[in-house]
Amino acid sequence: MSNFHSICVRRWKIWLLAVIMIAIAVVFCIPLYSVIVISFKTSRELIYTPLALPESFYLENFFSAWEKLNLGTVYKNSIIVSMGAVVFRVLFAAMASFTLAKHKNKFNRFLYLLFLSGMMIPIYTVLVPLLRLIKDLGLINSHFGLIVVYIAMGMPFAIFMLTGFVKSIPNELIEAGIIDGCSVYRIFWVIVFPLIKPAVTTLFILDFLGVWNDFLLPMLTLSSNALKTVPVAMYNFYGEYGSRWEMTFAGYSLAIIPVLIICLLLQKNIVNGIMVGAVKG
Amino acid sequence: MDLSKLKRKDVIKKEISYISLYLPALILFLIFVIWPLIQAVWVSLTDWDGISNEYNFQGLTNYFTFFEDTYVLHSTIATFKYTITVTIVQNLVALVLALALNNQFRSRDLLRTVFFLPSLLSPLVVGYIWSFLFCDPLMKFGKMIHWDVLGNNILGNPDWAIFAAAFVTVWRSAGWTMMIYLAGLQNVPQELREAAAIDGAGTWRQLKSIVLPLLAPTFTINFILVFERSLKDFDSIFALTNGGPGDSTLTLALNIYRESFFYSRGSYGTTIGVALFVVMVVLTLIQLKFFTKGEEKIE
């Protein structure tokens, strides 16, 4: 009887907890709610009822934000930069981590530590010389320059993460490949790469979001309007139309939505990546 | 591996293949990370503005200025306030969320997603969104509850703006930290809690004696991760206050940006950057000590 009683109390407690958490989540969502709601409002509505549901399905803000931001081009730029940077970063890191994890000698161990030490360098430390270098190499104001820098900057963490995974591949598998007369490249591509694919996918998604959201570097290197990425476009947009909240918020909604979609589709991968980053970081 | 069967030529060929695998990564890393770092140290010893082709070597002058600069002092204090607040509050909030969402109920997974979502958004855009919220709806709310700090736009208040910025960061990235705590909670065996419950330990007692001690390693990791991350934050504060009002939210990162690109004192900005790098190195060394100790214990 008392057992039954305690189960009831427990159920009731969990139910109360759920209600409290839902209430907290609702409050937590107010900022995102307000962005979306305000995007649908006329400037008049915004003044009188900023956070109420919009009176009508008013889409004008989205159209003018899209047009003023030139969002088609901006999305395209962000996709080029993020894709270019992350595809090559992950590929180069995977290649390097094979040698670093499975072909151990003193020099490779030193190289591994050298790469890892890159994680300590804040971008602000190297900003001035880096910009000068980009300029001297003729890579300023180009996507290519930005991509190359991103590949290099993310390399330490990528190598760190992937080397951990390559290490866990049994040596027998690789030796079997050697006995069969496979070249090093073939072993990497046919045996190692498929085995670290889950880690590669995870790293790819996390780094993609990281580059997509990065602001300082593109702001400093891309001066031409036609090349701007999403965060830089948002920065300029705010500077120009900052007081017209209903339109800037429509712009922010359009900037946020692709990320939200990616996140909802790939949540499992993202969460896994965070765990790995935390456990090994 | 039995190398004796392979011919010497094959060994060399294999070695070259192995080297070629890390070559692209290494070349880019040396050019765009290590070389600028070496140059940064050199630049900090000059009076270079960051743009022109002329500069003079001036030894440690920048470093002497650094230690007497009130802006550096202010920005160190601002960074300290911001980083400490974010680290403590974010860990507390994330821990509470994780403990709550570790229970079984129907909307649990949805709630986890909800709290996690903002951490993937652009910190810059999140900053802009909150700058609106602070200057309109929250101002009205502040007047309603008679809290003048909030009622008069908290971002314009030199004493409070930095904490408002910290609050926004916690809102954005607590979900991230929560996910790591949730992973840590998977390592707390359910049987242990059940056994304690049978022995009459209440929820609070179970937390204190079983869950939290077992969560200690996760707490250490999160503490360090959040600290390092918030130390390097830029976008969000840039969007919210851009260092103002006065210099009350001018963190070291913003200060470096301002000196380097606003006041054209590239060498001095870089000097502050080198100081920040030194802080990072020290933190990493502490971290290494912590973790190698932890691993020894496990072994």
Image (cartoon, rainbow, N blue to C red):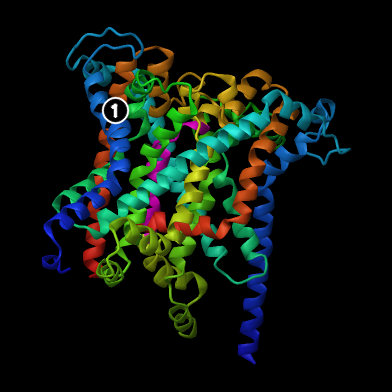
Is A18 drawn above or below residue A40 in the view shown? Answer: below
Subunit of label 1: B
Residue B130 visible, this angle = no
Q: Position of residue B85 (x, y in %)?
A: 44, 41
Q: Of helix, strand and loop, which mostly describes the magenta segment?
A: helix
Q: Quadrant of residue A258?
A: top right
Residue sitting farthest toward the right: A56
Q: Left or right? Give the position of A197 relative to A102.
A: right
Residue A178 is covered by the magenta coloring: no
Q: Amino acid at mark 1?
A: Pro
Q: Mark 1 = which residue?
A: B36
Q: Give residue B98's position: percent from left, percent from top.
A: 52, 61
Q: Is residue B235 above or below residue B294?
A: above
B20 or B273, nearer to the observer: B20
In terms of depth relative to the viewer, which is nearer, A149 or B267? A149
Label 1, secondary structure: give it.
helix
- Relative placement, left or right, of A39 versus A177 is right
Q: Determine which quarter of the picture holds residue B261.
A: top left
Q: Nearer the viewer, residue A130 or B202?
A: A130
Residue A34 versus residue B291 in the image, above or below? above
